[in-house]
Image: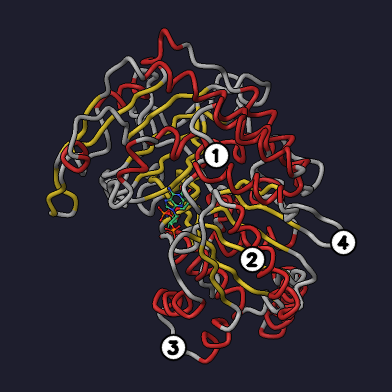
Amino acid sequence: MKNLEGDIMGIIENKIGSVVELCDDPTPEPAGIIIFGASGDLSFRKLIPSMYKLFKNRKLIDFYILGVGRSNFSDDDFRNKVLESLDFKQDVVKKFIEHIYFLSGDYDQDELYINLKEKINILNKKHNTKNNKLFYFATPPNVYIPIIRHLGKFDLNNEDENFSRMVIEKPFGNNLESAKKLDCELHKYLNEKQIYRIDHYLGKETVQNILMMRFANIVFEPIWNYKYIDHVQITVSEELGVENRIGYFENTGLLRDMVQNHILQLLTLIAIEPPASLDANMIHDEKMKVLKSIRRFNVDNLDEFVVRGQYTDGYINNEFKKSYIEEVGKNSKTETFVALKLLIDNWRWSGVPFYIRTGKRLKKKLSEVSIVFKDVPHSIFSDFYPVKFEPNALVIRIQPDEGFKLILQAKQPGSKICINTLNMEFKYRNFFDYEPQDAYERLILDALLGDQTLYVRNDIMEESWKLVTPILERWENSDLYYYPSGSWGPKESDRLIEKDGRRWRNYENI
Ligand code: NDP
């Protein structure tokens, strides 16, 4: 018996061993990374720490990072700020810092770009970066167009043997019209292969896992359709309010901030047909088909499908939280909560509603997708259990506690008809000895590798705006519902799902 166990362990180790090679990412070509808006929150909190991790893991070897902004920083000032933000004292940080520079100037003035070109040439020689450039747009979006026009004017957009790619932060536009305008401007100077529209949700390990789960296993596909699935729920909730991003959020709202991008992207991964390969365009083509199949909202009957809310004051974890209006300091109709019911009019999803809810200052922070299955066609237990069992569900937890679980009914020790609900649960942290890769680390590496799979193609961005823009327009003349901080949103959100005889998953004991 011992030998047999040993053999089996050997086989498993070999199997895992062969997979491990694929688990190590390739090393990208040498490149300079130029961050516009480098003195901002995103840069210090996410971008530079992610680049530091890539450096530590030897994915950045011949490279430089050039911060650009209006701040009057010298290279040393910027390096000191980076040091503070990294909060590491190891020697490796000192080595990393030697690759970092800053250039200050005004985005509207040619002078900045003349200096930029000159500095890029110097750094390119110094760090052997083969004139490859990755530009990261991390300024407020109103500056994107002046920057791209100037990059075009000074030939910094051109590719020859080298690459010149642009990562564009969200929000990509504010509605369909502005998104199209920005896209049109980008396409005057760049081809689509140079444009990386970021949606950091797509860089999350568990979001990438949706494709693996669906298409690397045979067990799900036969039941992944209207015959077996009753409905799908997506919940993305935050305990946090708008914190220090009030100015941004007040002009944006949650539909634009969460639904138009992150949640629709999640939904497409759940709903797409199997692509023929992992090729970025094949996946994007399938996503596009899903988006095009989503039934358009009847704006005259919007309440049937959409609920928007705003938080009032209340308690979260026994701590008092102010209302949104108090935080903004004025009357506002900006939504901090959205619930939606979507229908996908295609063969696979006919009649299967997708319920979505997302909000700030809700009771718990979590992001989860639940695939809720139908009941068995005939229950032989109904004489003993007049109440329906909890339905089978596959629950994909994106955060926290990344993993998934399968909810089943199973025999409980006791009498021969004793049944109970069983959660077969897999948590990444119990299985893999891993520190989850930050989404930005994944996405920056992919942009350097020239892999657009986890980025958003222009037609997909446009189609998502087409879906939500009519809602935004209708909301300009309508009221919203209120909910206390620390709740699960306005009661109208419960009504949205309960009128269909369903309910939101219960997160009270999680
Ligand atoms: P910030 O407001 O911190 O701005 C970034 C930098 O841009 C500032 O440090 C400033 O640098 C420069 N800047 C600010 N206002 C202007 C202006 N009017 N004209 C020119 N430059 C300006 O933004 P964040 O770092 O928070 O975000 C950057 C981008 O990333 C935004 O588009 C945001 O929507 C997006 N984003 C941010 C996230 C986050 O967590 N912070 C998450 C997801 C997306 P200087 O004064 O030196 O020029």
Give the CA distance from mark 2 to mark 3: 23 Å
The three-letter code of the residue at mark 3 reads: Lys
Numbered mark located on residue 33 in the image? 2
The three-letter code of the residue at mark 1 reads: Phe
Of 346 and 95, nearer the camera is 95
Tell me whether the residue at label 2 lies in contact with that at label 4, contact meaning CB atoms closer than 8 angstroms: no
Front disc: 2 or 1: 2
Give the CA distance from mark 3 to mark 1: 37 Å
| Picture residue at 48% right of the left edge, 75% below the top | 74
Please state the horizontal and vertical placement of residue 51, each as a whole percent of the image. 57, 70
Is residue 497 visible in the rendered image? The answer is yes
Of label 4 and label 1, which has the lower sequence position? 4
Numbered mark located on residue 89 in the image? 3
Q: List the residue tagged with mark 1.
A: 172
Describe residue 153's horizontal placement relative to residue 67 as left or right: right
Q: List the residue tagged with mark 4.
A: 161
